[in-house]
Image (cartoon, rainbow, N blue to C red):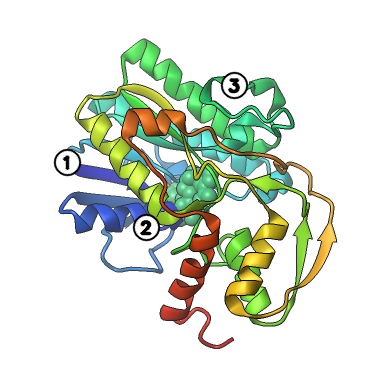
Amino acid sequence: MRVLITGSSGQIGTNVGLALLKRGDQVQGIDLRPNTWTSELPTIECDLAKCAPGELPAVGRFDAVLHLAAHAKVFELVEHPERALENVQVSFTVLEYCRRNETPVVFGSSREVYGDIHRHITDESQADFVVAESPYSASKIAGEAFIYSYAQCYNLPYLVFRFSNVYGRYDCDIAHLERVIPLFIRRIAAGEQIVVFGPEKVLDFTYVDDCVDGVLRGLDALVAGRISRSTINLACGQGSTLVDVVNLISLALRKEARARYEPTRSGEVTHYVADITQARQLLGYQPQTPLTAGIPRGIEWQRETGVLADL
Ligand SMILES: NC(=O)c1ccc[n+]([C@@H]2O[C@H](COP(=O)([O-])OP(=O)(O)OC[C@H]3O[C@@H](n4cnc5c(N)ncnc54)[C@H](O)[C@@H]3O)[C@@H](O)[C@H]2O)c1
């Protein structure tokens, strides 16, 4: 199949793009920035926020668009809410492209659409949009809402994935995006202090290979027409606290963590464990890697690629 990936230089885009190429599919990427991990992914450098709706620079027809481009850092968007609006504009531009070219869309949404689930509700039907926790959540809710309206009015086939804390490979470009696991790995390895915002937070961490497996299964099902209007939690289905994360990293690195604990920051989700029944039933998805196995693997990958070599 031919897949157009927006946000192809990012963590999920790079991992999925390379996996598609590996199994013989064709990929065209679009991103603001070049891909700093690999030269294998053909990438058109373009700010999608500056494209007219429906006008993407890609040439030819695609079997699906995997729309991942977004400003993806929750706290950054609390400080710069205009970037959340840009996310919505970009999603609109991409959706218009899909409508005009009759191309199914897979959208990279987030568990953030559930808000802060103090109530511990996790299946897909329970998203309650009056509890949008942050401008980032609002941008994902808006993206989803446009997709559902395009399905209603223009019969656009879609698959929305609600991702949750993906980690393990191509995720440690700290200058681009500070993700909690790679940040803690780097700091603990360097003997530096870490600040844990909300040590009691329970989150669902998804090992990258499980995420890639789910996305490929979803793309295949959508392109084959086995699904056409689905919204699916893609996660591990297990909750872990940030203290668990710190302890597992510390154990894998054989280094004691120097941690300072602070309250959760504004806009952050404090409890999320995904119900992955739909992913299992619709896609045959079966996550293989719990956090206890994924953290050592992520550290191993960082060592092999030299990211931790100097520490
Ligand atoms: N990784 C996760 O744990 C996670 C969790 C929930 C949701 N998501 C969502 O999944 C998608 C992919 O996540 P990721 O971790 O790969 O993010 P990422 O930040 O690594 O990648 C996103 C990419 O989008 C690009 N981009 C942003 N604005 C753009 C624009 N205007 N034009 C062109 N490119 C633009 C960025 O340059 C970046 O390379 C994002 O939409 C994110 O919000 C990810």
Density class for disc 3 (Cα within 10 Å; few <14, some 14-19, many ≥20) is: few
- Going by the numbered disc 3, the residue's amino acid type is Gln
- Tell me which corner region of the image, top left, top right, bottom left or bottom right, holds residue 86: top right
Answer yes or no: do the residues labelled 2 and 1 have beta carbons within 8 Å? Answer: no
SS at badge 3: helix
Question: In the figure, is residue 217 to the left or right of 12?
Answer: left
Chain-order first, disc 1 or disc 3:
1
Q: Is residue 85 visible?
A: no
Check the picture and name the quadrant holding the N terminus.
top left
The x and y percentages for residue 49 are 47, 42
The image's mark for residue 14 is 2
What residue would you read off at disc 1? Answer: 60
| Mark 2 beta carbon near ligand 1 (under 8 Å) | yes
Residue drawn at (44%, 16%), measured in percent from left and top?
149
Element at label 1: loop
From the top left corner, tell me how far across and down residue 112 is, in percent: 61, 37
Instruction: Check disc 1 and give the amino acid type.
Output: Gly
* Left or right of 44 on screen, residue 133: right
Q: Mark 2 vs mark 3: which is more N-terminal?
A: 2
Cα–Cα gap, marks 1 and 3: 38 Å
